[in-house]
Image (cartoon, rainbow, N blue to C red):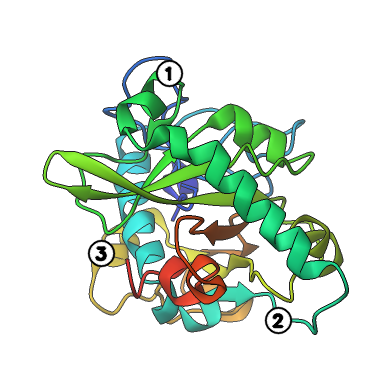
Amino acid sequence: MGNRFVVFVAFSLLVSGAWAQQPQNTAPAGQQSIPGMDMSGMKDMKAMPAAADKDKDTDSGGDNDSDASVHAMHSMEGHMDMGPHMKMTALRPSKPGDADRAQQIVESARKASEKYMDYRTALADGFKIFHPEVPQKMYHFTNYGYAREAFFRFNPEHPTSLLYEKHGEDYKLIGVMYTAPKRFDEAQLDERIPLSIGQWHEHVNFCAPPADKRAELMSPHPQFGLRGSITTQEACDAAGGTFHPVIFNWMVHVYPFEKDQASIWSVERQHGDAD
């Protein structure tokens, strides 16, 4: 199995993500892939087909992959605690047209998602829930076709994931998630969503533990993973791990049903503090 257990996605979910079975055209009771995941450069680690390099899509893993994806998901819910494991785009000075362009994206996100107020409609249209059996602050319903599309072009009416909060047996739609290839620089991200308004993030400095230390991922103060104390290639090598500078695609959340810009593009909320 090697390091295929990974983290994620995911997603890692992100994100997706950690990375188990290929998405099926059935109800997503066991969907394991992290939304927005790009693991294409990681040896022996499964990539979500939506985000992997088109020439480097890989296959699914087994039970260890599923266990790791749960770890990744919980790690990603606490983004603000990740410190050196997260990289964010800086807010830029506003340029002419930024506000209008951002508003168009919000309107497109609202138009694309409002028909999915009833989560069953999203499932019927092919969105898959990431780990529905695990309690989460926010649930990603991912469309893998849209995720593949996002690797090549940006369509604000095709979000990679719909974001829901769970209330009893029901799900409440709160927003959407867009993804972009991890190879993108900030100028390319700015072309998709103006960086004077929205902030993308990606997950970095990930040390995958060796097989005999996988259990440490779930410990309160791990060495490895997205919450781990290891943040450099040298420290990871010394601990017997496998270092990956970047593990997921760029991600950004939009909350198009909120009333003001600060809430629509809330960094704190997308990082899990207000979910």
Instruction: Write down the residue under mark 1.
Output: 24
User: SS for tag 1?
Assistant: loop
Outermost residue toward the front in this view: 259
* Image: 233 above or below 256: below
State which tag comes first along the sequence, 3 or 2: 2
Q: Amino acid at mark 3?
A: Met
User: SS for tag 3?
Assistant: helix
Assess whether mark 1 and mark 2 are in contact (beta carbons under 8 angstroms): no
* Image: 168 above or below 142: below
Foreground label between 1 and 3: 1
The residues bearing labels 2 and 1 have C-alpha atoms spaced at a distance of: 38 Å
Q: Amino acid at mark 2?
A: Leu
Q: Which mark is residue 218?
A: 3
Work out which quarter of the rendered image holds the N terminus and state it. Answer: top left
Instruction: Write down the residue under mark 2.
Output: 91
The residues bearing labels 1 and 3 have C-alpha atoms spaced at a distance of: 28 Å
Residue at the image position 52 percent from the left and 32 percent from the top: 143
